[in-house]
Amino acid sequence: MKPIYVAGAGMTKFGRADWSLIRLASEASRAALHHASLGEIPVDGVVVANMGAARVNKQTALGSALVDQLALYPAMAEAVENGPASGASAFKVGCQAIASGMADVVLVTGVERMRVVNGLEGTDFVASLSHPEVEYIYGVTLPSLAGMFARLVMDRFGVERRHLAMVAIKNHLNATKNPYAHIQQAVTMEGILTAPEAIVNNPPIAEPLHMFDCCPVSDGAAAVVLVSEEIMTKLGAPPIRVAGIGQATDTHAVHEREDPTDLKAVRLASERAFAMAGLRPADVNVAELHDAFTILEIAESEAAGFFGHGEGHLALERGETALDGRLPINPSGGLKAKGHPVGATGVAQLVELTWQLRGEAEGRQVKDAEVAYACNFGGFGNNVVATVLRREAR
Amino acid sequence: MAHISELEASLRPPAMEMPPYPPKAITLASGEKMVVRQVERDEIPTLLEAIYPLLWVERDFYDIVAARLFGELLAYKRYRVKDEYVLAGLIDGVLAGMVNGRLVDAKTGMSYHTLTIRRGLRVGSHLFAAKMEYHVEHCGQEEILIVAESPIGFRRWMIEYPLEKRFEVQHELGGVPSWVLPKETYYKAKPRLVAGTRPVPEELLASAETIVLPEQEIVVRQVAGEKEGET
Amino acid sequence: MSDKVVGGKCSACGAVSYPRRAVCPKCRNETFERIPIEGEGTVLTYTDVYALAIDYETRYLRLAIVELDSGQRATGQLLADDPKLGMRIQTTIGVVRKPGEKPITGLQFVPI
């Protein structure tokens, strides 16, 4: 496999977009392309990550559409769909093109514009990733799967609602320093949990998960430019190496998981990514995890290998994952506060980490970040892509 | 009270005795304290100025709510609607949202509108609950007639309380037939939907004495979302 | 519209797949017999969902994952007023979703 580098990264502000789906994608793409400063170097391929365009936006063939918008034809192009892990999967496909030698420059753009439909339609669309015969027909939605998972984990490992609240508080605070974040509003333990008003401020969504345990529905796009070693040298940019990528799957129906409190696919995907990178979890300086629900940040931090099974909430409590902690998790604000345009998320995580490794994450910079890790959680944990990025010496 | 002419008096509806709404303080998710209090007629111009830019925000039906509310607030100020009340939520004195309605008679209330300026903190939920509290607990009413103009309102009120259909009654707002909140349902829903503490601490109450206009640009941006440029 | 919920029992090794699949995860055999998913069991986990999708008009839905005594796990609607982890339940079949005219039946769990 040939080495792969990230030469540029850009995104739109997440939130409620006025722009069309393709306009969002092209704005993020242009930001990434400008950041890469390719000059005369051509783009060989474009990979678009998206989950819902065919259903929610009534548009298909997004790879072709974006190529046209950016006047990049006759470059190779296609779209990749892997539910909420579409972003990292598209990134993986782009990396494979570089690694195989089939391409020297690939643009990977994730985009989602979900807010064109109302909340009920949006929830139903995301629920379509569940098993149609043994889950969906019961009214299973993604929050319901997270709620059942949370209850079990809380019962078995002593995780409490206040730990979930700590994740929300931390990520909301981080997002106030991120101009691209959907929600830039700090919240307090009093306001979301301990005050009597908390029951109104933070109503149940899928118990024991409440409103502030669930990420918002967002529109937005994020993009990175992947290049080969030769191009990286030509550009003279800070070398951000794609050190490792790992992917693993698990059973479709959540009830068939071997251990319903164990995010096995996260563990396997992470092991594969670290193995490829020749690194260990202890080497990671900053991480972006998939906190579509606060419980998932805690659980993924364990399955990825940063903390023991059932100990993630203790590390959180000790402040280890805060911006100024030993291992900052979700400096961007995470899905919880930065937002979660489904197809864009996996790419947005890598945009943040690229900025962190280049020292360009103003206001929320993790000092001396050299190794970064991202976890993009597809389905409800049955398809996970983990990535390790590393800043090499020039 | 200034002397009014016979003509003016004939143009004003007869007024029922309405108890004042005792202010309360609510801790929001952000940790900020919101004071919910009644709005006097001489404060109405400030509210009108706040909602004026929303008359052209289509998103989430702000335009129609703002337009109708504008008329209702003006009618309240100038004594041209019977037994109307207006409540506002203030954060550090800055207007965060407002609700209004009126008393049809001793037994029945008519809910008019709920408009949230500071979004993302359940201000609308708190204020709607405050006006239900006013009708039931302070005015001693039996039930309140309610309609929703937006899907958000429908979800928050019709489904969440829940409300009952009273479709044989046409709501004053002239759109769909009415739903109703009976006082029994109010009391049942109270533990999970109605919050706040009384009395409001002196310093906090003082901060809410004068209604401060939120910055217009921020209002429109908060309510309508970021304007990301033309399509 | 059958009134039983069905899994697939591998004709080679007897392992049960619920949901059914085309290839047995244990022995890779590709033929199965139909086997009803029913009986008594315990609640593994549950939740009350308020953020509902289309087709539902209730304020919330109570869902659970149960472990049946027969060895299978299943997802369904929990019809218990006072749910507890580990409580004993029995499966029944009922209407679980009404997408328009044709109601869908599936597993419901009642306390025993």
Image (cartoon, rainbow, N blue to C red):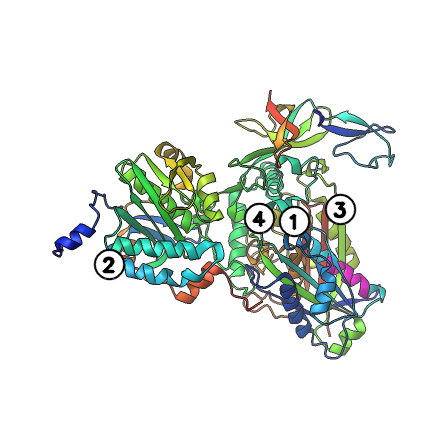
Q: Which portion, as a residue range, is magenta?
A: A90-98
- Per the image, label 2 sits on a secondary structure element best described as helix
Identify residue for label 1. Answer: A300
- Judging from the image, mark 2 belongs to the subunit labelled B
Q: CA distance from mark 1 to mark 4?
A: 10 Å
Q: CA distance from mark 3 to mark 1?
A: 15 Å
Q: CA distance from mark 1 to mark 2?
A: 56 Å
Q: What's the magenta bit mostly, secondary-structure-wise? A: helix
Q: Chain of mark 1?
A: A
Residue C61: x and y, percent? Answer: 56, 35
**Amino acid type, residue under disc 2 in the picture:** Asp
Is tag 3's residue or tag 4's residue first in the polypeptide sequence?
Answer: 3
Residue B12 screen position, x and y as percent: 20, 50
- The residue that disc 4 covers is A294
Residue at which label 3 appears: A249
Q: Residue at x 55, y 54 (%)?
A: A319
